[in-house]
Image (cartoon, grey):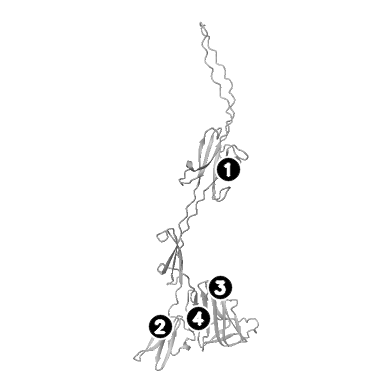
Amino acid sequence: MRGWARSLRTGDVTMHEKTLRYCGALGGLLVPLILQSCRDGNRVCEVTLDEDGVTHQVCYQIGDFGKSTLAQETPQAPDETCPYGGKRIDTGFDDNDNGILDPNEVDLTANICDGVPGASGASALTAMSPEGPGAACEHGGVRVDYGVDGNADAALSEDEISGTQYVCHGAPGPAGQDGGTGPAGPTGPTGPAGDGEGAQGPVGATGPAGDAGPSGHDALIETEGFLGSRGPCTNGGVTLLIGVDDGDGDGVADDGLLDADEVETAENVCNAVGETGATGATGATGATGTVAPPFQAFQNAAAVSVFDGNPVPFSTSSVGVSTADIVPDYITESFAVVTPGNYQIDWAVNVLSFTGLNYSVALEVGGSVAAGSRVTSSSEGETSGSVNLTLDTADVIRLVNDTTPAVGFAPIETSGVNSFLIYGTPSLGAMIRFQRLP
């Protein structure tokens, strides 16, 4: 409860006074002999008597309500505290009420660290080399070795080869036709008759070459990486697509591309599955949270009338202090929710008299009566209620004179004004209590 109290003794009479945040219309009625002024919502003044019998006027400044608690989460880069990074949680009081946790407002910091990263699995590799004519390929081709890069050097060594495939060239095309015989050269002059046979004449020129026969088609190979499952692989890998660029089906011959209809063989080379990395160390257990203490407000004025649709006032007498969960507004007589959650709300009013046949009191949340909160009575004295509600941040609650009668009661009969009078003597005129449940 925000405020202060002191005693002033004059003769045999001891008088007590209490300073509040606001001075209501009845404040002057409660303590007319003590308070000399109630000028605004920031201070109150009184006349005091010192030891020499001289009177003085002393004014007191009204204190602010308690500050809100804030928390802020930021990423934690790797450092000595968290070698592999993590999160940093800063908490503190919002001293300047700007709704932001400024650096000079941080009271406590906690680090939540990430664990050691697990090791990566080995990759699948392939290696291609020319293959001469022989048992594997009658007319030569390409040799494709594949396996898992066990030593992670990005090269497929002999001891890492787990399988081999051959892509062979097609058979050579037929020989072209022989060219036609060239024309006979001119007859040389007759040589002189020799004693024997004459020398052989020169060989005639070679005729033009015949047309070339059709060429064979190139063998092609393409690789296609994949993730997840395919065929026997469960951890991704590479698919080898092998064929001849012969224009089979809808393919285009000799275009240097392995079309789908030209693929003759497809082989999947699987990635190795690495061992699961070690589990990171468990972070330290955070401090156990606490439920904020309940918020309470009271009204103990001599007499206050509450008219239909209006809230029960709490600002003319002893009031509660704002908490981390509930902040009161004693101008609008409402209570704003800061922390969302489930709340038990208890209230009571001490009714001295009322107009009509009966009266109703209920809790409003955001301007609408909360289900199960209305209590209707046709008797004087204390009327109370209790209800559990789920409240969100910024919900506004008021305890109001609700003119809608409950089932089974006669309609409220008024002459334009339905009211009841709450009375603070000998007990409280009104009380409201908020408790956030775990």
Q: CA distance from mark 3 to mark 4?
A: 20 Å
Quickly name the residue at label 4: 297
**Mark 4, secondary structure of its residue:** strand
Q: Residues within 10 Å of mark 4 (few under 14, many from 20)?
A: many
Return the residue at label 1: 266
The three-letter code of the residue at mark 4 reads Ala
The residues bearing labels 3 and 1 have C-alpha atoms spaced at a distance of 62 Å
Give the structural element (helix, strand or loop) at label 2. strand
Residue pointed to by mark 3: 390
Whole-number angstrom distance, CA of label 1 to CA of label 4 = 80 Å
Q: Which residue is mark 2?
A: 60
Asked if the residue at tag 4 contacts the one at tag 1, i.e. Cβ–Cβ closer than 8 Å, the answer is no
* Residue farthest along the left direction in this orientation: 52
Q: Which mark sits nearer the N-terminus, 3 or 1?
A: 1
**Which marked residue is nearer to the observer: mark 2 or mark 3?**
3
Distance between the alpha carbons at the discs numbered 2 and 1? 91 Å
Q: Closer to the observer: label 3 or label 1?
A: 1
Q: Circles 3 and 1: CB distance less than 8 Å?
A: no
Cα separation, mark 4 vs mark 2, equals: 22 Å
- Horizontal and vertical percent position of residue 352: 56, 88
Q: Nearer the viewer, residue 195 or 99?
A: 195
